[in-house]
């Protein structure tokens, strides 16, 4: 498994895993990763967990609605596995309370029956460890977040890391493509600068080059690929243009934009807004999303 970027986090877990594997510490620290969508939280969690000689047992937070859901998950868990909950902010409050007990005491108590017939059963899970990931940390209570020994905000990826992810993917496909190093930055410029989007567009690029029977990624080919993806000579695609035109009517909330564009809020934030913000075409203020003067000039409103 290859992990590119997030060097400070990887180095921290190199140190912690060495202490654990040398039996200098007995418990793997429960960890929470925070980032926008597409940053590779699951991949990073898998990599960090593997450092301890463990496997990952993954589940989506929205699937943990009832206490029985968590109990069933714990029943499936092997000693060699560490549970990873993606979108952990979406679990129910009842399940959160059980997780509090697991993180604090490595055990949970289940009551069966009622009144004088009620009976309590305690289930112990020695040195319980949990990895979690969220794109919405504001939905986590302070009480929940504080129970994680390590809370890490993933760093933005620089061009060097994104190009490395791109190169690794092309090599993994075992295709005889020649990549002109001068156009790699041009390719990265049409992604939203997350590993997920780099991989998605890399796959589309391979298909595009094969369809035009080219084995060289040149400046000419990358320009044709940008047109294929719907980017115009201003460097924006149709979705971004529609977004900017809507904002030209005045500040808008993310909810209103989502309704207007018939796209989910996570899609708007991770696939459309991220580049518009980075290129200073829009800004987020107390009034909502606003188009900047630079954005107005781009769509020729001034």
Image: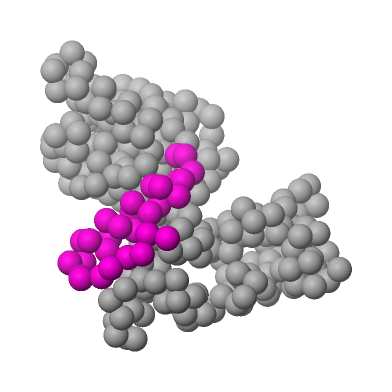
Q: Say if the magenta span includes residue 8.
A: no
Q: Residue at x 79, y 66 (%)?
A: 296
Q: Quadrant of residue 167?
A: bottom left
* Residue 109 makes an appearance in the image: no
Which percent across, then down, holds residue 104? 35, 22
Q: What colour scheme does the image use? A: one colour
Q: Single out the residue that lies furthest toward the top.
A: 24
Q: Is 109 displayed left or right of 176 in the figure?
A: right
Question: Could you say which is closer to the camera, residue 234 or residue 200?
Answer: 234
Which percent across, then down, holds residue 273? 61, 59
* Residue 8 makes an appearance in the image: yes
Q: Single out the residue that lies furthest toward the bottom.
A: 212
Question: Could you say which is closer to the camera, residue 86 or residue 48?
Answer: 48
Which percent across, then down, holds residue 140? 52, 38
Residue 163, relative to residue 141: is it above or below?
below
Q: Residue at x 52, y 80 (%)?
A: 227
Quadrant assignment for the C terminus: bottom right
Q: Residue at x 76, y 60 (%)?
A: 294
Which percent across, then down, holds residue 39? 42, 49
Q: Quadrant of residue 233?
A: bottom right
Residue 271, relative to residue 156: is it above or below?
below
Q: Say if the magenta span includes residue 166.
A: yes
Residue 221, relative to residue 143: is it above or below?
below
Residue 156, relative to residue 145: is it above or below?
below
Q: Single out the residue that lies furthest toward the right.
A: 302
Q: Residue at x 58, y 64 (%)?
A: 272
Question: Could you say which is closer to the camera, residue 144 or residue 268?
Answer: 268
Q: Quadrant of residue 205?
A: bottom left
Q: Which residues are magenta?
A: 154-182
Q: Is 240 displayed left or right of 57 in the figure?
A: right
């Amino acid at each position: 498994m290859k992990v590119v970027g997030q060097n400070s986090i990887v180095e921290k877990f190199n140190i912690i895993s060495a202490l654990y594997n040398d039996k200098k510490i007995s418990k793997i620290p429960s960890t929470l990763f925070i980032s926008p969508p597409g940053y590779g939280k699951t991949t990073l969690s898998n990599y960090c967990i593997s450092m301890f000689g463990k496997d990952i047992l993954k589940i989506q937070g929205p699937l943990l609605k009832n206490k029985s859901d968590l109990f069933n998950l714990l029943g499936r868990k092997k000693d060699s596995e560490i549970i990873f909950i993606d979108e952990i902010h979406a679990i129910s409050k009842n399940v959160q309370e059980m997780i509090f007990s697991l993180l604090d005491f490595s055990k949970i108590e289940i009551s069966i029956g009622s009144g004088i017939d009620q009976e309590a059963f305690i289930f112990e899970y020695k040195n319980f460890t949990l990895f979690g990931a969220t794109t919405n940390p504001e939905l986590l209570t302070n009480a929940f977040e504080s129970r994680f020994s390590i809370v890490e905000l993933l760093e933005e990826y620089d061009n060097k890391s994104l190009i490395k992810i791109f190169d690794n993917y092309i090599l993994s496909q075992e295709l005889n493509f020649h990549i002109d190093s001068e156009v790699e930055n041009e390719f990265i410029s049409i992604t939203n600068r997350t590993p997920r989007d780099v991989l998605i567009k890399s796959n589309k690029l391979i298909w595009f080059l094969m369809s035009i029977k080219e084995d060289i990624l040149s400046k000419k080919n990358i320009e044709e690929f940008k047109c294929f993806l719907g980017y115009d000579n201003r460097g924006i695609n149709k979705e971004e243009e529609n977004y900017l035109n809507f904002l030209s009517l005045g500040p808008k909330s993310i909810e209103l934009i989502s309704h207007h564009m018939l796209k989910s809020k996570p899609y708007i934030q991770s696939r459309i807004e991220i580049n518009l913000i980075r290129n200073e075409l829009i800004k987020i203020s107390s009034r909502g999303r606003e188009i900047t003067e630079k954005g107005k000039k781009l769509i020729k409103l001034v």
